[in-house]
Image (tube, grey):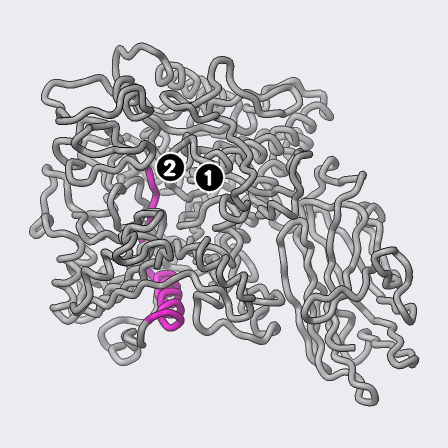
Amino acid sequence: MGMVWVWILCVSSSFKLRKLRKDGTISATWYSSCYYIRDRRMIVDLSKDHYDGVPVIVWFHPGRGYEAALAVLRWCKALRELLVSTRQRQDCMQPLILEKPELAEPDYWMITKIHGEVIGRAYFPVQQLLDGEEVDEWLEILNTERKPVHGHSKIHVKLQYFDVTREYNWNRGIKVTRFPGVPYTFFRQRQGCRVTLYQDCHVPDNFIPKIPLSDGKFYKPQRCWEDMFDAITNAKHLIYITGWSIYTEITLIRDRRRPKPGGDISLGELLKRKANEGVRVLMLVWDDRTSIPVLQEDGLMATHDEETANYFRGTQVNCVLCPRNPDDGRSIIQNIEIGTMFTHHQKIVIVDGEMPNGDRGRRRIVSYIGGLDLCDGRFDTQFHSLFRTLNTTHHDDFHQPNFTGTSIQKGGPREPWHDIHCRIEGPAAWDVLYNFEQRWRKQGVRDLLIDLRDIDNIIIPPSPVMYPDDHDTWNVQVFRSIDGGAAFGFPNAPEEAAKSGLISGKENIIDRSIQDAYINAIRRAKHFIYIENQYFLGSCFSWYSNDIKDEAINSLQLIPKELSLKIVSKIEAGERFSVYVVVPMWPEGLPESASVQAILDWQRRTMQMMYTDIIQALKVKGIVANPKEYLSFFCLGNRETKKRGEYEPSETPEPNSNYHKAQEARRFMIYVHSKMMIVDDEYIIIGSANINQRSMDGARDSEIAMGAYQPFHLCVKEPARGLVHGFRMALWYEHLGMLDNRFLQPESVECIRKVNKIGDNYWDMYSSESLIHDLPGHLLTYPIGITENGEITELPGVQCFPDTKAPVLGTKSNYLPPILTT
């Protein structure tokens, strides 16, 4: 008979529990099976020999019973997969827990052979689970016509549904300093860390928001590329870098008011100099398969990968171009699909740094992660100028990929860049290092990694950098999206993978902890959530769309649905809760292109699903309110009047082109490249992962992130007023151009109304035909309308984004595969 797989699948029918907005977990346990093999009845009873009931796969050997058991249960409608495995006579077992925001009817177990051939299905009506009572039944295995398979085989299962509000951490925030972090992850939470938060590449001296913190302190913004320059310059033993793109010609120091010795050197020359000093410089740069030497060196994504590799060839810098290879278990078709469509997206710099106490004989590991690649087009400040830096900072770094034929010779507007990054010191910095080592051992040319055990008298082992009673200490946990195709050392045995916080499927081993971290934080949230992200789409299983099939889109990541259900639960409880989401006006690229329009279409469907959930909940409670008082979307833009002495281009864009129109109107979006979420001003997630399937899947783009909080600055009896709060307020000061006491309570209706009013005013100024003065702030209301039923519509008179012919609501693509744009 071969190996048997047991899958829990969920299929749509006329009755859909998404209309009931159910959220929770399923405990599913397979206790025994009844099979007829060679006309002999065989029962596998897992309630004996300490099994106590576990999901299993059984190898059958007539006369010898079974020798191994493995469980894989999957709920295909909502992505969350976990593997539980066992061997005979193992001492303890636990049932599989499936996190599900959506249930549909009917529910069935699918029985297949190891290579996916379906043997049969066992159906179970999901309505019986909703009261939370345990269901204990024998289910007959049926064929596709719902007739018994040969031998009338059965499985004995127990199922129980637990509403999410019964979870221990639900709506509790981080209640105690002993909060253990996100469970079931590869990296556990580390204590005694220090975190530095960065908004944009640089902060000029004249950006001075006065933001009070607890303990009588004031928030002080930090400077990312300045700190990175110092860290690389001062490294003595190692510099490890990963990037989606790394460009050797950029300079990290550009503020003429803040010069540094050697600050005019390019990144490439700086790295070569350090390597020549004896520092081990290792680089993992994503290999864009479309960048072919001689034919098309730049590639479709213009990442400079071939150019960067050629620059360092023959030097002491070890630069490896690494394609996004799939895990070993993938098919040839999947190999091609993953290798050409997906990327290595982690942005990491790791160095050995000075000791905080000034001990010159010892060194420590310092890591940087976030959204910033070390490449062109990234350097910017909180002022995000369109035209006024073209003579200086951006003359040799002009970046504008949203129009055709752009160049510094033709002038602005350049594309301003908003991003978020962080520095990690302490034990969690070593987790970032270990991630790099796993990736290098998988795809590096040879093992050039420094064995830190050989110099443990110089570089200290993982240890706290802050005292436990220091009020500035941080607890930090590192998360990833990655699989065995990109990381060395992932266990092959499913039971070992489960122990390591990894997910096992038929074909690969996956670390999907970034998505887990977002879900965990959303469920813990008490008052508000603030998100900045380059993309916002997913939870397609709950889209209210009749023109697509969920399984064809497969954008299943749960974050949008978790957010809407969180808001719904608060409405039902009569409590305030606000969610603010900042995204780019459109994804980078030509806004009329099929790929950009497809992403905007997925984004519209995601927004519509969320607003429909909220409006239905308001109606049930009899509340008359604007759904934007619970969930609001924004984008960023800038508009500048012309100043004397401004850069004068020698050429002009093509008349009536988008480029020409934007130049005449002197406006353009600020590109939001951030990947960040703040919860209740106490917890923050920063990384490289977007809120889409590519980043959250684990088997698509490789990503890294961290979740952190200060245990002495929690939202318990008083609002949190630590560095997370200061960072959010500094971001709002950057975007809104002001501070307001209402911003201290983002969950309040007064605050979200104020922010929406400012966003509406700024949008009107941005989109106006006339330009009288500079835009006083950058936060623009995202230009969509919402009907009384939650449908997303155009704003009156705003079918397309200003200066373009690109529809705001996007357009469904009939030829681009969804896997490419989700």
Q: Amino acid at mark 1?
A: Ser
Please name whichever residue, 603 or 572, is drawn nearer the observer in this view of the structure: 603
Q: Please give the name of the residue rendered at 55% of the width and 24% of the height, measured from the top-left corner.
A: 628
Image coordinates of residue 254 in percent, x first then y, are 15, 41
* Residue 114 image-quadrant placement: bottom right
Q: Does the magenta run of residues contain 351?
A: no
Residue that lies at the very extreme toward the front in this rendered image: 295
Picture layout, residue 494 above or below residue 190: below
Q: Marks 1 and 2: CB-CB under 8 Å?
A: yes
* Residue 463 image-quadrant placement: bottom left
**Disc 1 secondary structure class:** helix
Image coordinates of residue 18 in percent, x first then y, are 71, 39
**Disc 2 secondary structure class:** loop
| Residue that badge 1 annotates | 595
Q: Amino acid at mark 2?
A: Gly
Q: Which residues are magenta?
A: 418-444
Q: Please give the name of the residue rendered at 57% of the width and 74% of the height, measured from the top-left corner.
A: 496
Image coordinates of residue 309 in percent, x first then y, are 24, 61
Q: Please give the name of the residue rendered at 60% of the width and 72% of the height, measured from the top-left corner.
A: 494
Give me the disc on residue 589: 2
Please name whichever residue, 633 or 288, is drawn nearer the observer in this view of the structure: 288
